[in-house]
Image: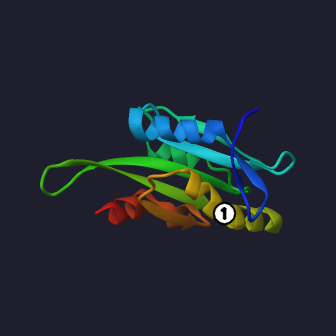
């Protein structure tokens, strides 16, 4: 398996699949969102789920587990008040209160390394429950 980048602070590796999927979402618009997870055994950040172009924010929110941490990126398309079509990429650090303390610490310390690999993120949202990352939060941040 080819490795892309090692995150120095935690010793985690980000797979090429993560970076390639992100570039496909950013440039080719073939994905609406990507969910990433850390495999503690192999010390790899991998792609957990990819949302197709027809899927929306509700599908992303439904794909996040209630008892484990994840990272996600979401490509938010919107129209400005000047009637211009825009797209902003959100990075979501999902750390629900029901997840293990070890997982929360691992995801918190690995976040910056993954963000450096995923070049082109506009906004970051950190959430511990669904209300902190609701669609209204995304819309308000994108203005």
Question: Image quadrant for the N terminus?
Answer: top right
Rendered residue at 80%/68% (across/down):
101
Position of 49 with respect to 44 (left or right) is left
> Residue drawn 66% across and 63% down?
95
Which quadrant of the figure contains the C terminus? bottom left
- Seen at 61% across and 41% down, the residue is 18
Choose top left, top right, bottom left or bottom right for residue 71: bottom right
| 112 lies above or below 61 | below
Residue that mark 1 sits on: 95
* Residue 62 vs residue 138, the one in the foreground: 138
- The x, y position of residue 139, in whole percent, is 34, 59
As drawn, is 90 to the left or to the right of 100? Answer: left
Residue at the right extreme, as displayed: 41
Q: Is residue 110 left or right of residue 91?
A: right
Q: Left or right? Give the position of 8 relative to 31.
A: right
Residue 140 visible at all: yes
Looking at the rendered structure, the secondary structure element under dot 1 is loop
Q: How crowded is mark 1: few (under 14 residues within 10 Å), some or many (20 or more)?
A: many
For the point 40% across and 59% down, the residue is 138
135 over 55 or under it: above or below: below
Q: x and y percent of residue 31 in the render?
A: 47, 35
Q: Nearer the viewer, residue 66 or 82?
A: 82
Query: Does the image show residue 98?
Result: no
Q: Where is residue 102 in the image (x, y as percent from the top left)?
A: 82, 65
Q: What colouring style does the render use?
A: rainbow
Count of marks placed on residues: 1
């Amino acid at each position: 398996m080819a490795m892309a980048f090692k995150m120095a602070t935690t010793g985690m590796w980000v797979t090429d699949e993560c970076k390639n999927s992100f570039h496909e979402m950013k440039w080719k618009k073939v994905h609406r969102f990507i969910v990433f997870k850390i495999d503690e055994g192999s010390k790899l950040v991998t792609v957990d789920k990819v949302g197709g172009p027809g899927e929306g924010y509700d599908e992303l929110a439904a794909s996040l587990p209630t008892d484990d941490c994840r990272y996600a990126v979401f490509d938010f398309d919107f129209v400005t008040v000047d009637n211009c079509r825009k797209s902003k990429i959100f990075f979501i650090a999902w750390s629900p209160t029901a997840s293990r303390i070890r997982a929360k610490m691992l995801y918190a310390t690995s976040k910056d390394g993954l963000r450096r690999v995923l070049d082109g993120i506009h906004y970051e949202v950190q959430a511990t429950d669904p209300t902190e990352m609701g669609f209204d939060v995304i819309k308000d941040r994108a203005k």
